[in-house]
């Protein structure tokens, strides 16, 4: 009798220790979120400020489901091939539970199929090209899509800028630019405007005098150039040097401090549609974010990419909380059901894996970004 | 395409071509004396823009002084690259020096990415180069016109140095027969160092004028201009400084005209330069002004 008592006591003790051990291991196991952002290359500006937004989000909310959150940052070098490689690495080597990224539509389009095939949920904070989430089960985004953004741009051009003719200058190496320009042109013409010129350039081009000379000849009321800030700054300068007085309208890729630093006087009056501005916050979360960002990074203006990154982190963590686990299919299902999420960039609801939320229109005035309007969907 | 439009694009093309020409002179001189294509030259041009940038922003130098200091620092950089990377390989097969040049190029690019960061910086364009001159319906940036004249003036200076000084004579001698020259009592390494210094200083002028024209600098900015300047040097006849500038002008003008006449082809503007290189190598490898040099 004594022997069996000892045995059962020992058994219980061992079982207890093993259970404790397993429990500790599980509790200690962090939630792994992979991040693939452009930290170098032409889009580095967005990646660097976006990651600051993510780090702030992690600082404000370091745990989910009682476990620590670990971010695995990979640099996609602003390159499509690197993006696909980065996502592969995150899934196979780091075995992440979910992925945040990419930022540009082109790179997200490259990384998405890899995540979709591996059935890992992925949210892009900033990619607005509609094709990114089309026919995908595991790919989501935290922002609006370009059919909406192009519509907002066209409406602004027709109603606020009173433009009858538009010249469109597109970066044909970027899926985002091609997509949003098409939506702008369709909507602009539906609203009674006329597109008088449609010209191309490549990412990395420095000289736009040939295209601008052609545009000058067509005498448009507005130039729609939804490019990334680097080329946009030079385009604005060269347009003014060529004697073109028409206002320039752009999209959310224009929002970077460097646009003003490099563009100087030439970008005064340049307007663009985007996701977020610190002056146009509509939510409490937004106000808190601006304060936290400013105190953490006093010299940097909180912009759309950082705000959306912050929101993406919380959208993902909320989905995990609702799912009660990091099981990829459960998280995926909860992401689909995201509704009335109060984020930094507004109140938003997931529809077909895209967020329905308002857009803001900013302009450059006196060397600073100035909020003009918020447009609800 | 009206006459005025054509003239405007011609001036733009000459301006762009001048920049290619200034960088091409460095390529052609180094090739002439060492038979080495210094692939790091484009990145040397990039370094010059950063030297000037820091001179203006960190040391608050007036732009012309920052430019002069940058030229000097770039010349020293060129000499240092030669002394450190190419000189130990003087007697090695040419392919070794070529690979080293590519290595130096990667080194400069990646070191700059780490030290300077990848975010583009705004380069200051001095007030004297800001005005846009309106002649009829043509708008020309004053900087473009100044660039053309500065390039021509420097070309005259290079001619004087290469054809009217003893150092120039030594340089021409080295390009004819590198290994006999020391037998004539000339310090070979000094001549080579001088060539690198001069070529790099000219690249610095090109780089700073480039940064004033397209006022943003970043560590990878030297790759494409460097490659195009190489094409210009081959087009004009590698080894010939006049050819380098002529090649630069031709390349600049055709590149601008291509996009002006056929805006749909603007995506191919870089590809066009390399197509030109292939055609030159196929049909006239010595270039326009090249001489058949004995091997």
Image (cartoon, helix red, strand yellow):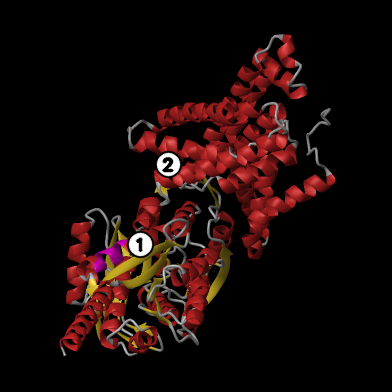
The image quadrant of residue B179 is top right
Looking at the rendered image, the quarter that the C terminus of chain A falls into is: bottom left
Q: Which mark is residue A113?
A: none
Looking at the rendered image, the quarter that the N terminus of chain A falls into is: bottom left
Task: Give neighbour class at mark 2: few <14, some 14-19, many 20+ (Cα, 10 Å).
Answer: some
Q: Position of residue B162 (x, y in %)?
A: 67, 21
Q: Chain of mark 2?
A: B
The image quadrant of residue B102 is top right
**Magenta-highlighted residues:** A52-58
Q: Which mark is residue B125?
A: 2
The image quadrant of residue B69 is top left
Q: Who is closer to the viewer here, A162 or A200?
A: A200
Q: Residue furthest top?
A: B185
Question: SS of the residue at dot 1?
Answer: loop
Q: Who is closer to the viewer here, A214 or A180?
A: A180
Query: In the rendered view, would you say A335 is above or below B143?
Result: below
Q: Would residue B254 be found to the left or right of residue A95 on screen?
A: right
Q: Position of residue A375 (x, y in %)?
A: 31, 80
3D distance between C-alphas at marks 1 and 2: 21 Å
Q: Chain of mark 1?
A: A
Q: Position of residue B99 (x, y in %)?
A: 65, 40
Q: Main secondary structure of the magenta part?
A: helix
* Total numbered labels placed on residues in the image: 2
Residue B118 within the segment the image draws in magenta? no
Q: Are marks 1 and 2 in contact (CB under 8 Å)?
A: no
Residue at numbered disc 1: A269
Residue appearing at x 36%, y 67% in the figure:
A271
Q: Who is closer to the viewer here, B87 or B148?
A: B87
Q: Would residue A73 be found to the left or right of residue B40 on screen?
A: left
């Amino acid at each position: 009798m004594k022997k069996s008592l000892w045995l059962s006591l020992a058994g219980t003790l061992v079982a207890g220790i093993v259970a404790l051990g397993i429990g500790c291991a599980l509790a200690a196991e962090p939630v792994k979120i992979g991040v693939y952002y452009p930290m170098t290359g032409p889009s580095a500006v967005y990646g660097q400020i976006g990651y600051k937004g993510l780090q702030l989000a992690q600082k404000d909310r370091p745990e989910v489901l009682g476990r620590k959150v670990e971010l695995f940052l990979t640099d996609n070098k602003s390159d499509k091939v690197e993006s696909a490689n980065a996502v592969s690495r995150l899934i196979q080597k780091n075995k992440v539970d979910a992925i945040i990224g990419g930022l540009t539509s082109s790179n997200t389009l490259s990384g998405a199929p890899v995540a979709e095939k591996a059935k890992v949920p992925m949210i892009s904070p900033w990619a607005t090209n509609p094709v990114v989430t089309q026919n995908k089960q595991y790919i989501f985004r935290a922002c609006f899509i370009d059919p909406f953004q192009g519509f907002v741009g066209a409406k602004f051009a027709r109603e606020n800028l009173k433009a009858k003719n538009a010249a469109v200058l597109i970066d044909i190496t970027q899926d985002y630019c091609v997509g949003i320009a098409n939506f702008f042109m369709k909507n602009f013409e539906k609203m009674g405007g006329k597109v008088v010129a449609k010209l191309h350039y490549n990412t990395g081009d420095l000289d736009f005098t040939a295209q601008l000379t052609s545009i000058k000849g067509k005498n448009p009321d507005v130039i729609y150039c939804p490019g990334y800030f680097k080329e946009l700054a030079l385009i604005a300068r060269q347009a003014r040097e060529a004697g073109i007085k028409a206002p320039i309208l752009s999209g959310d890729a224009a929002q970077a401090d460097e646009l003003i630093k490099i563009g100087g006087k030439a970008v005064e009056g340049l307007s663009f549609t985007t996701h977020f501005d610190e002056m146009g916050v509509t939510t409490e979360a937004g106000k808190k974010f601006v304060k936290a960002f400013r105190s953490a990074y006093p010299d940097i203006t909180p912009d759309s990419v950082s705000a959306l990154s912050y929101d993406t982190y919380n959208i993902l963590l909320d989905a995990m909380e609702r799912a009660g686990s990091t099981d990829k299919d459960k998280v995926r299902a909860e992401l689909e059901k995201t509704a009335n999420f109060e984020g930094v960039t507004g109140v938003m609801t997931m529809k077909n894996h895209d967020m329905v939320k308002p857009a803001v229109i900013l302009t450059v005035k006196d060397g600073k970004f100035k909020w003009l309007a918020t447009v609800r969907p | 395409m009206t006459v005025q439009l054509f003239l405007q694009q011609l001036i733009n093309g000459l301006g762009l071509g001048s920049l290619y020409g200034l960088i091409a002179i460095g390529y052609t001189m180094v090739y002439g004396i060492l038979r080495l294509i210094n692939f790091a030259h484009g990145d040397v041009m990039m370094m010059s823009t950063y030297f000037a940038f820091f001179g203006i922003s960190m040391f608050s130098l007036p732009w012309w002084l920052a430019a002069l200091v940058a030229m000097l620092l770039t010349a020293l950089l060129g000499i240092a690259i030669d002394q450190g990377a190419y000189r130990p390989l003087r007697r090695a097969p040419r392919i070794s020096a070529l690979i080293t040049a590519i290595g130096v190029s990667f080194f400069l690019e990646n070191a700059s990415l780490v030290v300077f960061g990848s975010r583009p910086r705004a380069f200051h364009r001095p007030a004297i180069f800001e005005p846009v001159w309106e002649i009829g319906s043509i708008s020309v940036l004053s900087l473009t016109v100044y660039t053309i004249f500065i390039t021509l003036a420097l070309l005259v200076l290079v001619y004087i140095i290469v054809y009217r000084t003893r150092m120039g004579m030594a340089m021409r001698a080295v390009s004819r027969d590198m290994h006999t020259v020391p037998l004539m009592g000339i310090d070979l390494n000094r001549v080579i160092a001088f060539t690198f210094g001069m070529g790099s200083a000219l690249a610095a002028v090109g780089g700073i004028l480039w940064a004033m024209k397209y006022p943003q600098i970043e560590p990878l900015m030297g790759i494409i201009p460097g490659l195009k300047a190489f094409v210009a040097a081959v087009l004009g006849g590698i080894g010939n400084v006049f050819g380098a500038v002529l090649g630069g002008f031709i390349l600049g003008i055709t590149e601008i005209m291509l996009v002006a006449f056929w805006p749909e082809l603007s995506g191919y503007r870089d590809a066009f330069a390399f197509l030109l290189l292939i055609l030159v190598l196929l049909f006239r490898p010595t270039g326009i002004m090249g001489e058949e040099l004995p091997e």
